[in-house]
């Protein structure tokens, strides 16, 4: 894999020294954090040359005065049972603007015709571009700007345009909801297009829509838009299953591109290579300042064990540590990455899992990626089934143990399978024992009960995403949780169980 390109500017090749010299050290000397120091931090990270004679002492001072804190796990926080209005649907900042502009440049290089007028349509109220698009793209209407339009109206507009070359969705999970809804409401949409409500009547286009839907979900997007080349969504954690489902069914044969990776509501990784295998991101220098904490099988090490971007080793896993330039807090995000290469001295990574999404009823600590592997193996043994989405609940959340051993309640959305036999349900528990020796031991001794699998009906996970977005603490874009920690969210799925 070749990831070489133009060099990263020398002014940001050692950002930690710049950070310590320009901001942290003056603050330590005065004991105050002036607005000027805080406001000048991004500029200092970009422009200041470090004159430090002792880099080791600089980074030690930095770590000593800004100890590590853990990321808040408030995404699913209950607020006295009330669902408050969502926060802003876009996050701002220099990193978001950088990701948007670099993503547009990379997309235009890989697919030159995509950004032509009328070549792109966004079918979700949110945009995959981290920052509202600057002029001239918005003025020319080349890429959809984020807005509060109804998803049905956005989809209708896209369906009336057969010459699209790029299809956008805020996240892959949101786009999956759009295609599932398209199949359910296809006839109504065709009648609307034929009647010209709104716009001029397009009876031929309505006939094309009906014909495309009659052939089933596989390859539907290419039949609706024959010139379609790429699907653009924003990777935000918990999106892999939706992308896999879209690639296998509705968007078969299309490339997928995410301009950035978002965690905790901010950009932490840039995608500069639409033509490379999906899921590779560059960890950029600058603000927000990123460190890497090695991930070990035991307990996490102390703050002094963090390494800088240029010190990352290929093949190793690290937890991301970010320093916020506003509050000057140094926080472990709970996001694990694996280094797969380098772009000059900056690591290129793939995102592995979120530590906050681990399952543990008896201290077994099954990580998100380990559980996903087991579930994938089990679904592969269910004839005709395609996994669309899943979430887990520890039995104590739903009080479902009823005197038995604690266990996992697993809710799945499937395509191609309407009922789950007991034999199929048991396969997940067997697969979990295969991937986790600790879980196998606990099952052998009866300390943990078998995982219980439930099939939910169409639209169940869409309702869950609505409930998540309504929480004031929910970031944008909304990360899809794989482990639900609160009863009212688990009940969104529990009430939609069909098998």
Image: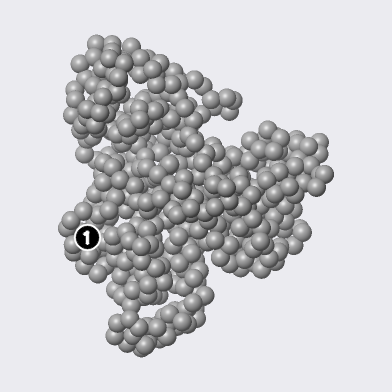
Above or below: residue 356 compared with residue 213: above
Q: Residue at 40% of width from left, 27% of height from top?
A: 330
In this rendering, the count of numbered labels is: 1
Q: Nearer the viewer, residue 210 or 186?
A: 186
Q: Which of 11 and 479 is in front in this view?
A: 479
Q: Residues within 10 Å of mark 1 (few under 14, many from 20)?
A: few
Q: Position of residue 75 (x, y in %)?
A: 50, 44
Determine whether 428 is above or below 267 in the image: below
Q: Where is residue 19 in the image (x, y as percent from the top left)?
A: 28, 24
Q: Work out whether residue 285 or residue 441 is closer to the camera in this orientation and state it.
A: 285
Placement of the C terminus among the 4 image quadrants:
bottom right
- The kind of secondary structure element at disc 1 is helix
* Spot occupied by residue 398 in the image (x, y as percentages of width and height): 70, 49
Residue at 73%, 47% (x, y): give it. 399
Residue appearing at x 46%, y 45% in the figure: 473
Measured as percent of width and height from the top left, residue 379 is found at 63, 56
What colouring method underlies this structural image?
one colour
Specify the quadrant that holds the N terminus.
top left
Is 312 rendered above or below residue 425? above
Note whether 143 is above or below 298 in the view shown: below
Q: In which quarter of the image is residue 58?
A: top left
Q: Can residue 303 be seen in this view?
A: yes
Who is closer to the viewer here, 256 or 409?
A: 409
- In the picture of the structure, the residue carrying the numbered disc 1 is 138
Does residue 271 show up? no
Query: Residue at 26% of width from left, 46% of height from top?
Result: 97
């Amino acid at each position: 894999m070749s990831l070489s390109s133009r060099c990263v500017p020398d002014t940001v090749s050692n950002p930690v020294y710049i950070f310590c010299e320009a901001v942290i050290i003056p603050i330590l000397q005065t004991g105050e954090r002036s607005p000027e120091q805080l406001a000048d931090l991004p500029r200092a990270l970009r422009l200041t040359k470090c004159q430090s004679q002792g880099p080791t002492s600089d980074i030690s001072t930095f770590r000593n005065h800004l100890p590590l804190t853990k990321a808040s796990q408030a995404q699913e926080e209950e607020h006295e049972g009330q669902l408050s209005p969502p926060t802003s649907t876009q996050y701002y900042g220099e990193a978001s603007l950088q990701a948007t502009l670099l993503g547009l440049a990379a997309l235009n290089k890989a697919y030159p015709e995509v950004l032509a007028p009328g070549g792109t349509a966004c079918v979700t109220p949110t945009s995959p571009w981290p920052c509202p698009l600057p002029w001239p793209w918005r003025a020319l209407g080349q890429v959809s700007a984020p807005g509060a339009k109804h998803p049905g109206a956005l989809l209708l507009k896209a369906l009336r345009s057969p010459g699209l070359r790029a299809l956008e969705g805020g996240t892959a999970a949101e786009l999956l909801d759009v295609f599932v809804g398209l199949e359910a409401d296809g006839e109504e949409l065709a009648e609307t297009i034929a009647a010209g409500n709104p716009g001029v009547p397009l009876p031929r286009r309505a006939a094309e829509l009906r014909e495309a839907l009659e052939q089933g979900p596989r390859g539907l997007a290419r039949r609706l838009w024959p010139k379609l080349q790429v699907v653009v969504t924003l990777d935000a954690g918990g999106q892999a299953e939706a992308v896999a489902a879209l690639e296998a069914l509705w968007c078969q044969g299309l490339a997928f591109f995410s301009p950035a990776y978002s965690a905790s509501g901010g950009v932490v990784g840039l995608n500069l290579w639409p033509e490379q295998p999906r899921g590779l991101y560059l960890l950029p220098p600058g603000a927000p300042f990123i460190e890497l904490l090695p991930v070990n099988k035991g307990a996490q090490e102390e703050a002094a064990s963090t390494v800088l971007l240029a010190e990352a080793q290929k093949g190793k896993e690290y937890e991301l540590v970010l320093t916020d330039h506003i509050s000057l807090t140094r926080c472990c995000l709970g996001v694990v990455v694996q280094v797969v290469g380098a772009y000059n001295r900056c690591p290129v990574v793939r995102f592995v899992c979120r530590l906050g999404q681990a399952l543990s009823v008896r201290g077994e600590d099954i990580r998100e990626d380990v559980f996903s592997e087991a579930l994938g193996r089990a679904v592969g043994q269910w004839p005709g089934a395609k996994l669309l989405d899943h979430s887990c609940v520890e039995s104590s959340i739903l009080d479902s143990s009823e005197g038995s051993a604690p266990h996992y309640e697993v809710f799945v959305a499937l395509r191609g399978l309407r009922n789950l036999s007991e034999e199929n349900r048991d396969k997940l528990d067997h697969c979990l024992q295969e991937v986790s020796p600790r879980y196998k031991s606990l099952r052998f001794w009866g300390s943990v009960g078998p995982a219980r699998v439930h099939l939910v009906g169409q639209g169940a996970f869409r309702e869950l995403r609505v409930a998540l977005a309504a929480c004031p603490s929910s970031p944008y874009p909304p990360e899809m949780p794989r482990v639900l920690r609160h009863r009212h969210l688990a009940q969104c799925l529990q009430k939609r169980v069909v098998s």
